[in-house]
């Protein structure tokens, strides 16, 4: 699993978040479980 | 407002040799009308001194009418084009464009358009983007056919997620196209005026810039356009190295009618593809050009029958 630059991952257990500042292979784990990639939150129209 | 400072500078047809028949418009100020008589400057001097030039009075008339519709927006568009670099990093140009767009959102021409446009609230929560992934080529499809794929905030966010994911996968190529009668009719007019203010809109526009994503992936994204390709519907494709148009494509920049300039990167992407005069021509004319004319201008790279569009885009993306 690739960790992509600029992506945020969160832990479902503790709510902790990490921000990837250097891309690379491997998994991110917290509380013994894979962390989930966070989707960007919806933003309002810019028009 | 000080009208004289915003008047287009026109060179009217004269009686002299061909350069004196030049009709040109300088959208940044100066005298309202210059008539050249006697010895004329060279074509090169004139081309360098004016934003646009033509030997066709009808074309000059279209530009002047565009200018009259929204002189502030036209002036801002011309200033952007003059300041933009046509190569290298697109980011400074995108920042300048967004700044100008937000400035115009706070201006009188956009306010007047908002007051007179019909109101409709037809937002729905259906998906706006479908991604079909195979190993190396992802087909990214706009899925709002009943609205000609009008780009609203939901579609922007979904497209941003899809393209951002593809961008982070250097082994993946993207074929971008739209479902229904059109590729994309531009920003969703129903959302115009709903931005949380010009400053926050600036932050959203640049923080979630589809233009930057397409630009960064330009060598591995192929865009197929058809039907109405207006505003963002041509501004974003123009960043890609390869754009295929169906023969029914109609390309245009309607922003001036709203008192705005292109806001999806078009003042960067279109000059880089087709030259600065092509951008100002589209902006001031306000109409659309057909697929053949778009090809002649360099706005698209090839034209295919509509029934062939998807196959051709996938073929190119899979190379």
Image: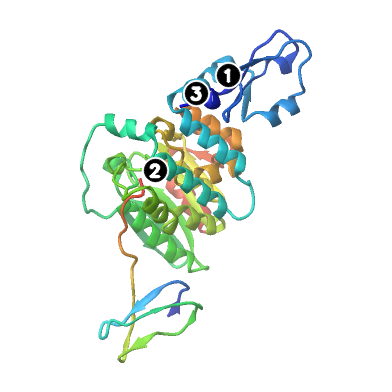
Q: How far apart are marks 2 and 3 (CA)?
A: 39 Å
The secondary structure type at the circle numbered 2 is loop
Q: Nearer the viewer, residue B36 or B221?
A: B36
Q: Identify the secondary structure beneath mark 3.
A: helix
Circle 3 chain: B
Label 3: few (<14), some (14–19) or many (≥20) C-alpha neighbours in 10 Å: few
Subunit of label 1: B
x 48%, y 40%: residue = B245
Mark with earlier residue (2, 3)? 3
Q: Return the x and y of residue A20 as percentages of the image width and height.
A: 45, 77
Circle 3 residue: B3
The chain letter under disc 2 is: B
Identify the element where label 1 is drawn. Answer: loop
Residue at 42 percent across and 66 percent down: it is B165
Q: Distance between the residues labelled 1 and 2?
A: 39 Å
Q: Do labels 1 and 3 share a chain?
A: yes
Q: Residue B251 carries which label?
A: none
Residue B303 position, x and y percent, is: 52, 38
The residue mark sitting in front, 2 or 3, is 3
Mark seen at residue B183: 2
Q: Give the left or right position of residue B120, taking residue B133 as reference.
A: left
């Amino acid at each position: 699993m690739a960790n992509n630059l600029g992506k945020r991952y969160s832990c479902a257990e503790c709510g902790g978040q990490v921000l990837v500042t250097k891309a690379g292979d491997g998994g991110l784990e917290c509380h013994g479980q894979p962390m989930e990639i966070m989707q960007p939150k919806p933003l309002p129209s810019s028009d | 407002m000080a009208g004289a400072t915003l008047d287009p500078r026109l060179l009217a047809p004269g009686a002299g040799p061909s350069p004196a028949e030049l009709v040109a418009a300088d959208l940044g100020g100066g005298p309202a009308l210059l008539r050249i008589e006697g010895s004329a400057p060279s074509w090169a001097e004139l081309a360098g001194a004016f934003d646009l030039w033509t030997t066709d009075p009808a074309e000059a008339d279209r530009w002047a009418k565009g200018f009259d519709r929204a002189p502030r927006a036209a002036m801002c568009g011309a200033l952007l084009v003059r300041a933009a670099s046509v190569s290298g990093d697109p980011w400074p140009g995108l920042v300048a464009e967004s700044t100008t767009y937000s400035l115009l959102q706070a201006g009188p021409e956009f306010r007047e358009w908002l007051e007179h446009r019909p109101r409709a609230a037809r937002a729905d929560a259906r998906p706006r983007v479908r991604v079909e992934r195979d190993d190396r080529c992802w087909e990214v499809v706009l899925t709002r056919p009943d609205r000609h794929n009008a780009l609203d905030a939901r579609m922007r966010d979904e497209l941003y997620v899809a393209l951002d994911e593809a961008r982070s996968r250097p082994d993946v190529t993207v074929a971008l196209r739209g479902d229904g009668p059109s590729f994309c009719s531009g920003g969703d007019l129903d959302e115009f005026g709903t931005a949380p203010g010009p400053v926050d809109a600036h932050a959203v526009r640049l923080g979630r810039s589809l233009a930057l994503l397409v630009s960064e992936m330009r060598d591995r994204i192929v865009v197929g356009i058809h039907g109405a390709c207006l505003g963002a519907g041509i501004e974003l494709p123009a960043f890609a190295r390869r754009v295929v148009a169906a023969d029914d494509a109609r390309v245009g920049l309607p922003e001036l009618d709203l008192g705005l300039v292109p806001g999806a990167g078009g003042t960067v992407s279109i000059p880089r593809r087709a030259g600065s005069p092509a951008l100002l021509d589209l902006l001031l004319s306000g109409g659309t050009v057909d697929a053949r004319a778009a090809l002649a201008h360099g706005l698209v790279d090839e034209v295919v029958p509509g029934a062939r569009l998807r196959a051709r885009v996938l073929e190119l993306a899979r190379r």
